[in-house]
Image (cartoon, helix red, strand yellow):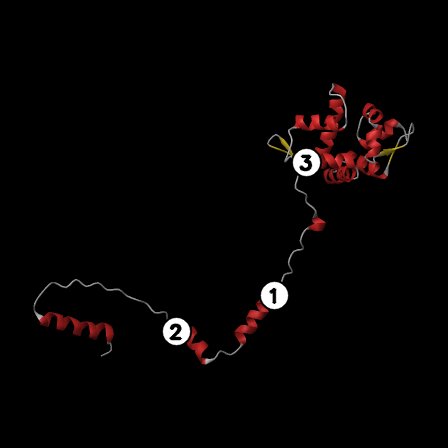
Amino acid sequence: MTLDGLVNIVGINRYRISANHKFLAELGLISGGRKKSATTLGKNLGRALEHEQENDIRSLWQEAIRGNEEMSKLITAIRLQRGKSPEDLLSHILYVADQKNNTDNRARARTISNILMVSGLIEDQDGQLKVAEPIDKENEAPEPPDNSSEAVTDETDDQEEPLDEEQTTAQLNIPTIAINIQLQIPETENADVYENLFKALRKHLLNPDE
Protein backbone atom coordinates (compact mmCIF):
# COMPACT_ATOMS: atom_id res chain seq x y z
CA MET A 1 0.00 0.00 0.00
CA THR A 2 1.30 3.44 -0.90
CA LEU A 3 1.63 6.27 1.58
CA ASP A 4 -1.15 8.15 -0.21
CA GLY A 5 -3.45 5.16 0.16
CA LEU A 6 -2.61 4.96 3.85
CA VAL A 7 -3.39 8.67 4.21
CA ASN A 8 -6.90 8.07 2.88
CA ILE A 9 -7.49 5.07 5.12
CA VAL A 10 -6.16 6.34 8.43
CA GLY A 11 -7.28 9.95 7.96
CA ILE A 12 -3.93 11.56 8.83
CA ASN A 13 -1.81 13.56 6.40
CA ARG A 14 1.42 12.31 4.77
CA TYR A 15 3.74 14.30 7.03
CA ARG A 16 2.16 13.06 10.22
CA ILE A 17 2.15 9.43 9.12
CA SER A 18 5.85 9.59 8.31
CA ALA A 19 6.74 11.56 11.43
CA ASN A 20 4.54 9.50 13.72
CA HIS A 21 4.98 6.07 12.16
CA LYS A 22 6.15 4.60 15.46
CA PHE A 23 3.24 6.12 17.35
CA LEU A 24 0.65 4.87 14.86
CA ALA A 25 2.29 1.44 14.88
CA GLU A 26 2.11 1.33 18.67
CA LEU A 27 -1.59 2.13 18.42
CA GLY A 28 -1.97 -0.85 16.12
CA LEU A 29 -3.14 1.21 13.15
CA ILE A 30 -0.23 0.67 10.74
CA SER A 31 2.65 -1.73 10.32
CA GLY A 32 5.72 -2.13 8.13
CA GLY A 33 8.80 -0.07 7.35
CA ARG A 34 9.09 1.78 4.06
CA LYS A 35 6.07 -0.05 2.70
CA LYS A 36 3.68 0.96 5.40
CA SER A 37 0.32 -0.77 5.49
CA ALA A 38 -2.80 -0.40 7.56
CA THR A 39 -3.71 -3.13 10.02
CA THR A 40 -7.23 -4.52 10.24
CA LEU A 41 -7.95 -2.01 12.99
CA GLY A 42 -6.49 0.78 10.86
CA LYS A 43 -8.56 -0.23 7.83
CA ASN A 44 -11.74 -0.40 9.90
CA LEU A 45 -11.00 3.02 11.36
CA GLY A 46 -10.24 4.43 7.91
CA ARG A 47 -13.52 3.08 6.53
CA ALA A 48 -15.44 4.55 9.47
CA LEU A 49 -13.73 7.91 8.92
CA GLU A 50 -14.47 7.83 5.20
CA HIS A 51 -18.17 7.19 5.78
CA GLU A 52 -18.36 9.45 8.84
CA GLN A 53 -19.67 6.74 11.14
CA GLU A 54 -19.21 8.50 14.45
CA ASN A 55 -20.08 5.58 16.71
CA ASP A 56 -17.64 3.27 14.94
CA ILE A 57 -14.96 5.97 14.86
CA ARG A 58 -15.34 6.41 18.60
CA SER A 59 -15.28 2.70 19.43
CA LEU A 60 -12.31 1.95 17.13
CA TRP A 61 -10.24 4.77 18.61
CA GLN A 62 -11.13 3.45 22.05
CA GLU A 63 -9.90 0.00 21.03
CA ALA A 64 -6.61 1.48 19.83
CA ILE A 65 -6.14 3.57 22.98
CA ARG A 66 -6.95 0.77 25.40
CA GLY A 67 -4.44 -1.44 23.64
CA ASN A 68 -1.68 1.12 24.23
CA GLU A 69 -0.22 1.40 27.73
CA GLU A 70 0.99 5.00 27.44
CA MET A 71 -2.34 6.28 26.13
CA SER A 72 -4.17 4.40 28.87
CA LYS A 73 -1.92 6.05 31.45
CA LEU A 74 -2.99 9.46 30.16
CA ILE A 75 -6.61 8.55 30.85
CA THR A 76 -5.64 7.37 34.33
CA ALA A 77 -3.75 10.60 35.05
CA ILE A 78 -6.75 12.70 34.03
CA ARG A 79 -9.04 10.61 36.22
CA LEU A 80 -6.77 10.78 39.27
CA GLN A 81 -6.45 14.56 39.00
CA ARG A 82 -10.18 14.91 38.34
CA GLY A 83 -9.55 16.72 35.09
CA LYS A 84 -6.95 18.86 33.37
CA SER A 85 -7.09 22.03 31.37
CA PRO A 86 -6.21 21.57 27.66
CA GLU A 87 -2.86 23.32 28.22
CA ASP A 88 -2.08 21.19 31.26
CA LEU A 89 -2.79 18.04 29.26
CA LEU A 90 -0.43 19.14 26.47
CA SER A 91 2.30 19.85 29.00
CA HIS A 92 1.70 16.50 30.69
CA ILE A 93 1.93 14.64 27.37
CA LEU A 94 5.24 16.32 26.55
CA TYR A 95 6.55 15.65 30.06
CA VAL A 96 5.78 11.92 30.14
CA ALA A 97 7.08 11.55 26.57
CA ASP A 98 10.28 13.37 27.56
CA GLN A 99 9.91 15.79 24.63
CA LYS A 100 10.93 19.42 24.36
CA ASN A 101 8.23 22.05 24.61
CA ASN A 102 8.46 23.37 21.05
CA THR A 103 5.95 24.01 18.27
CA ASP A 104 6.30 20.65 16.49
CA ASN A 105 6.08 18.61 19.68
CA ARG A 106 3.10 20.58 20.92
CA ALA A 107 1.35 19.89 17.60
CA ARG A 108 1.96 16.16 18.11
CA ALA A 109 0.74 16.39 21.71
CA ARG A 110 -2.36 18.20 20.52
CA THR A 111 -3.00 15.36 18.06
CA ILE A 112 -2.94 12.90 20.95
CA SER A 113 -5.31 15.12 22.93
CA ASN A 114 -7.67 15.31 19.95
CA ILE A 115 -7.61 11.53 19.57
CA LEU A 116 -8.62 11.15 23.22
CA MET A 117 -11.46 13.60 22.65
CA VAL A 118 -12.67 11.95 19.44
CA SER A 119 -12.64 8.57 21.16
CA GLY A 120 -15.11 9.84 23.73
CA LEU A 121 -12.89 8.67 26.58
CA ILE A 122 -12.44 12.25 27.74
CA GLU A 123 -14.74 15.23 27.33
CA ASP A 124 -14.68 18.97 27.85
CA GLN A 125 -16.63 20.01 30.93
CA ASP A 126 -16.61 23.77 31.40
CA GLY A 127 -13.07 24.14 30.09
CA GLN A 128 -11.72 21.10 31.92
CA LEU A 129 -10.90 17.82 30.18
CA LYS A 130 -12.34 15.02 32.28
CA VAL A 131 -12.79 11.28 31.88
CA ALA A 132 -16.20 10.58 30.38
CA GLU A 133 -18.56 8.20 32.10
CA PRO A 134 -18.47 4.91 30.20
CA ILE A 135 -21.64 3.65 28.53
CA ASP A 136 -21.20 -0.08 28.18
CA LYS A 137 -24.43 -1.69 27.06
CA GLU A 138 -23.02 -5.17 27.55
CA ASN A 139 -22.48 -4.47 31.26
CA GLU A 140 -25.74 -2.70 31.84
CA ALA A 141 -28.10 -4.38 34.26
CA PRO A 142 -30.76 -6.32 32.35
CA GLU A 143 -34.22 -4.85 32.41
CA PRO A 144 -36.52 -6.60 34.88
CA PRO A 145 -38.96 -9.04 33.26
CA ASP A 146 -42.45 -7.75 32.64
CA ASN A 147 -44.58 -9.58 35.19
CA SER A 148 -47.52 -7.23 34.86
CA SER A 149 -49.74 -9.94 33.35
CA GLU A 150 -48.85 -12.30 36.17
CA ALA A 151 -49.57 -9.60 38.72
CA VAL A 152 -52.98 -8.98 37.18
CA THR A 153 -53.69 -12.70 37.26
CA ASP A 154 -52.67 -12.92 40.91
CA GLU A 155 -54.87 -9.98 41.81
CA THR A 156 -57.77 -11.53 39.94
CA ASP A 157 -57.28 -14.81 41.74
CA ASP A 158 -57.23 -13.01 45.08
CA GLN A 159 -60.42 -11.18 44.26
CA GLU A 160 -62.18 -14.39 43.26
CA GLU A 161 -61.53 -16.02 46.65
CA PRO A 162 -64.65 -16.01 48.87
CA LEU A 163 -64.57 -13.49 51.68
CA ASP A 164 -65.44 -14.50 55.21
CA GLU A 165 -68.00 -12.64 57.27
CA GLU A 166 -65.48 -10.40 59.02
CA GLN A 167 -63.87 -9.33 55.72
CA THR A 168 -67.26 -8.61 54.19
CA THR A 169 -68.31 -6.56 57.20
CA ALA A 170 -65.02 -4.65 57.18
CA GLN A 171 -65.41 -3.79 53.49
CA LEU A 172 -69.03 -2.64 53.93
CA ASN A 173 -68.45 -0.55 57.04
CA ILE A 174 -69.22 3.12 56.48
CA PRO A 175 -66.44 5.40 57.70
CA THR A 176 -67.20 7.10 60.98
CA ILE A 177 -67.70 10.84 60.63
CA ALA A 178 -67.03 12.96 63.68
CA ILE A 179 -69.02 16.17 63.90
CA ASN A 180 -67.97 18.85 66.29
CA ILE A 181 -70.84 21.17 67.11
CA GLN A 182 -70.22 24.26 69.14
CA LEU A 183 -73.27 25.78 70.80
CA GLN A 184 -73.35 29.14 72.39
CA ILE A 185 -75.99 29.12 75.13
CA PRO A 186 -76.89 32.36 76.86
CA GLU A 187 -76.21 32.36 80.54
CA THR A 188 -79.37 31.80 82.57
CA GLU A 189 -80.35 30.49 85.95
CA ASN A 190 -83.50 28.92 84.55
CA ALA A 191 -82.96 25.13 84.64
CA ASP A 192 -85.83 24.56 82.22
CA VAL A 193 -83.81 26.12 79.41
CA TYR A 194 -81.04 23.53 79.73
CA GLU A 195 -83.48 20.67 80.23
CA ASN A 196 -85.35 21.53 77.05
CA LEU A 197 -82.09 21.89 75.11
CA PHE A 198 -80.83 18.45 76.12
CA LYS A 199 -84.19 16.89 75.28
CA ALA A 200 -84.03 18.43 71.80
CA LEU A 201 -80.48 17.15 71.27
CA ARG A 202 -81.43 13.62 72.28
CA LYS A 203 -84.48 13.67 70.05
CA HIS A 204 -82.98 15.11 66.87
CA LEU A 205 -79.35 13.94 67.02
CA LEU A 206 -79.15 10.85 69.17
CA ASN A 207 -82.54 9.30 68.49
CA PRO A 208 -83.82 10.89 65.27
CA ASP A 209 -86.29 8.05 64.56
CA GLU A 210 -88.18 8.41 67.82
Residue 122, disc: 3
Relative image position of residue 128 (x, y in whole percent): 62, 31
Residue found at the very far top of the displayed protein:
102
Which of the 4 image quadrants contains residue 9?
top right
Q: Mark 1 points at which residue?
A: 149
> Which is nearer the eye, 64 or 79?
79
Which residue is at the far left? 189
Q: Which amino acid does label 1 sit on?
A: Ser
Locate residue 196 relative to residue 129 in the image: left or right: left
Relative to residue 155, is residue 5 drawn left or right?
Answer: right
| Label 2 SS | loop
Q: Mark 2 points at which residue?
A: 173
Considering only order in the chain, which callout, 2 or 1, is on the residue closer to the N terminus?
A: 1
Between circles 1 and 3, the one closer to the viewer is 3
- Tell me the amino acid under the disc marked 2: Asn
- Crowdedness near tag 3: few (<14), some (14–19) or many (≥20) residues, C-alpha within 10 Å: many
Is 176 located above or below residue 145 in the figure?
below
Image side of residue 121 versus residue 149, left or right: right
Which callout, 1 or 3, points at the residue further toward the start of the chain? 3
The kind of residue on which mark 3 rests is Ile
Give the CA separation, mark 1 to mark 3: 44 Å
Residue 52 in view in this figure:
no
- On the picture, is 177 further left or further right than 110? left
Structural distance between the alpha carbons of marks 1 and 2: 32 Å
Percent of width and height locating residue 17? 83, 27
